[in-house]
Image (cartoon, rainbow, N blue to C red):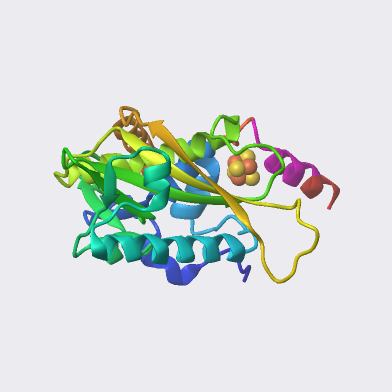
Amino acid sequence: MSKYYNSKRKNNIFEPESKEPFKLSRSRLELFLECPRCFYLDRRLGIERPGGFPFSLNNAVDLLLKKEFDAHRVKGLRHPLMEKYNIEAVPFEHEDLKKWQNTKVGIQFLYKPANFIVFGGIDDIWINSNKELHIVDYKATSKTSEVTIDEDWQISYKRQMEIYQWLFKMNNFKVSDIGYFVYCNGRTDREAFDKKIEFDIKVIPYKGNSSWIEKALKDAYLCLKNNVLPEPSDDCDFCSYREEAAKME
Ligand code: SF4
């Protein structure tokens, strides 16, 4: 049996006749938007797309940033980055924060038209003086140029932010359309490694627009309900590679 077929994942495989709400993470919705075929193979047929290597260094940055913002959260104070970028907000304190940060639980909402429990794990939330929440996402990279969110491939970052904003709005929180990316850029212009990497940190505001989400959820539902495997995405070479390879094999 292939390691990519996961027969034990029955709970996470969509059953067209089931009346039970189906749990759909924001990353799986992103997969649907990238390629409905891969999404269908994964959620309907139980064949996972091969994963990449774990981003352990990024995870370490996330964890340390969380600790740093938590230290300010308990005191109800602005973090120096908020001061530097003139953001009139403090880290948001809430009894469910740890749950929302857990990627397996996250913030959840039952979207009835598709019978999906949509969920996603956030990095952080800040609250401004108007009691509006700002969704915050940490990113880490290492590049010689300035970090931005303007590259085409970063549409997934923007959609990620918009889904979190939508999830909090659906849970009756007052949410600002402005979210923030705390973008850490590992510096490579040092003389030596010396057991540490230094980072430049930039806070990038982004104005989200969640208007696309409900249609995407309904489309994802129709995709899973259908008994036909969707066509491959035009932008991805892997299916044509597989087809050509299969002919030769
Ligand atoms: S086109 Fe790419 S993304 Fe889509 S099913 Fe094939 S391998 Fe997956």
Q: Is residue 240 magenta?
A: yes
Is any part of residue 23 visible from this angle? Answer: yes
Give yes or no for residue 239 being in the magenta stretch. Answer: yes
Q: Position of residue 135 (x, y in %)?
A: 33, 45
**Viewer-proximal residue, 232 or 229?**
232
Q: Residue at x 17, y 40 (%)?
A: 174
Left or right placement of residue 3 versus residue 45 in this view: right
**In terms of secondary structure, what is the magenta stretch mainly?**
helix
Q: Where is residue 121 in the image (x, y as percent from the top left)?
A: 36, 56
Q: Is 101 on the left-hand or right-hand side of 62? A: left
Q: Give the range drawn in magenta.
A: 235-244
Residue 28 x/y as whole percent = 44, 49
- Whole-percent x, y for residue 14 in the image: 37, 54
Q: In which quarter of the image is residue 209?
A: top left
Q: Quadrant of ligand 1?
A: top right
Q: How many labels does the image show?
A: 0
Q: Quadrant of the N terminus?
A: bottom right
Tell me if I can see residue 224 in this picture: no
**Front residue of 186 and 101:** 186
Going by the image, does 138 lie left or right of 187? Answer: left
**101 up-or-down from 205: above or below:** below
In the foreground, 84 or 123: 84
Question: Is 208 or 246 nearer to us in this picture?
Answer: 208
What's the residue at 45%, 60% (across, down)?
65
In the displayed structure, would residue 127 be above or below residue 49? Answer: above
Give me the residue at 49% from left, 44% from top.
31
Q: Which residue lies furthest to the right in this view?
A: 248
